[in-house]
Structures are given as C-alpha cells and as structure tokens.
Amino acid sequence: MNPFPTVRRLHLIAGLILLIWVVMYFVTGWVMIHEKWFPRGPQKVTTSEPLSLSEPLATAEFIKNLESAYGIGGQRRPPKPLANGGWQFNWVRPGENTEAIVSAGAKQVSITRTHFDPGGWAHGLHRLHGYRGGWAYWIWAGFMDLASAAMILFAVSGVYLWWKTTRNKLPGLLCLGLGIGFTTLIVAHLS
C-alpha cells in the first residue's frame, strides 16, 4: 500500500487548517506592530454600589453570582486578597477588561470596565489563551490545539513529501538543517 496519497491529503488538510490561524495571527499581529495606526486608548467606566451577596467572599459561588449580578464575562483571573480585607477580581476578554473590588465584609463593590478601541481588541484576540471563560473560550482553545497539531502534521508530512518527490536532497537537507539549527539556537538563547 502506497502511503503517499494519504500523506498528501493530510498535508493539504493541515495546510487549510493552518491558513485560518495564520491569517488571524497576521491580521492581529499586524495591528499590534502598527499600533500607532490603530489606537488602543482605554475608556474606563467605574461604578460603585452596595453589594447584597450572602456567600462567603472569593468562593466559586460568590464569583459566579457576582458575574451574574453585574453582567461580567470573560476569562476570570485568580482573585487577590487586599491589605484592607477586601478582594480584587479581574476578568479579561478581547476589547474589555473588568475589575471588581469588593470591600471587607462584602458590603460594597466597585466595578471598573475598561473598553479598548479596535487596536486593543486585536491585541486581546492575539493573546487569548486557556480553557476558561465559558464555551466560546473552550472552542477557541480547542481550535488553537487543533492548529498546533496541524502545524506539526504539516511539517512532518511536508518533509515526507519532499523526501519522496525530490531527487537532489542536498538543498532541502541544508534548509532543514539550517531551520533546525536556527530554532535550537534561539530556544537555547532565550532559555
């Protein structure tokens, strides 16, 4: 049985999956590189009001009820205790950050929502990661994992296809060796 057609088909599918992510990373990365063309100026809106949640502070139930009561969404960061006995809660999503400061005894909450312009939205989308924040974030992270697997499959199948179809292997071996050597050098230097 000849594996060449199957490997070629896998290479094509992996390339199409990668195309979606490469275009997204190009667009968001380009916006990040040319930030001066796409302002990221934050617009903060702060509200402060009495809090009427009865659960113990910083428990999962308290945080869920806080999100529900004030319409907060996004990826939740770990809560931080404050020196005055209160707690700081943060949520992040592309284009918006939310901070809730709950006073000691959970009597008062101050919520600051920071909205960003399109440049900030692209920056947030480019850096989005992790399986937390709800179903949309789970799908996003799942596609990121799929793109990572497609990247490996694309590279491995590409080397196989090159090996099977090229007679003069020296130029390809030089490129492959230089690529591996450069990557190894950069990883060693940054470690």
Image (cartoon, helix red, strand yellow):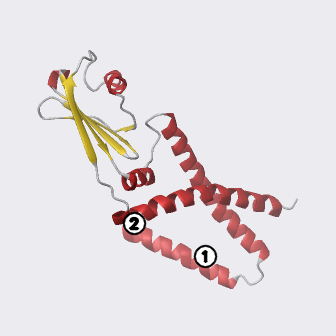
Q: Residue at x 72, y 73 (%)?
A: 162
Q: Give the residue type at disc 2.
A: Ile
Q: Is residue 58 above or below residue 117?
A: above
- Considering every residue shown, the one lying at the far right of the view is 1
Q: Is residue 72 above or below residue 106?
A: below
Indicate which disc residue 33 carries. 2
Indicate which disc residue 130 carries. none
- Callout 2: SS: helix
Of the 4 image quadrants, the one containing the C terminus is bottom left
Q: Residues within 10 Å of mark 2 (few under 14, many from 20)?
A: few
Q: Residues within 10 Å of mark 1 (few under 14, many from 20)?
A: few
Spatial CA distance of label 1 from label 2 is 29 Å
| Foreground residue among 138 and 190 | 138
- Callout 1: SS: helix
Indicate which disc residue 176 carries. 1
Q: Give the residue type at disc 1.
A: Leu
Q: Residue at x 77, y 62 (%)?
A: 8
Q: Position of residue 155 (x, y in %)?
A: 64, 65
Q: In the picture, residue 161 is in which quadrant?
A: bottom right
Q: Is residue 85 left or right of residue 145?
A: left
Q: Position of residue 36 (x, y in %)?
A: 33, 65
Q: Is residue 127 left or right of residue 163?
A: left
Could one spot residue 109 in this view of the protein? no
- Considering every residue shown, the one lying at the far left of the view is 84
Q: Residue at x 60, y 79 (%)?
A: 175
Q: Is residue 8 left or right of residue 47?
A: right
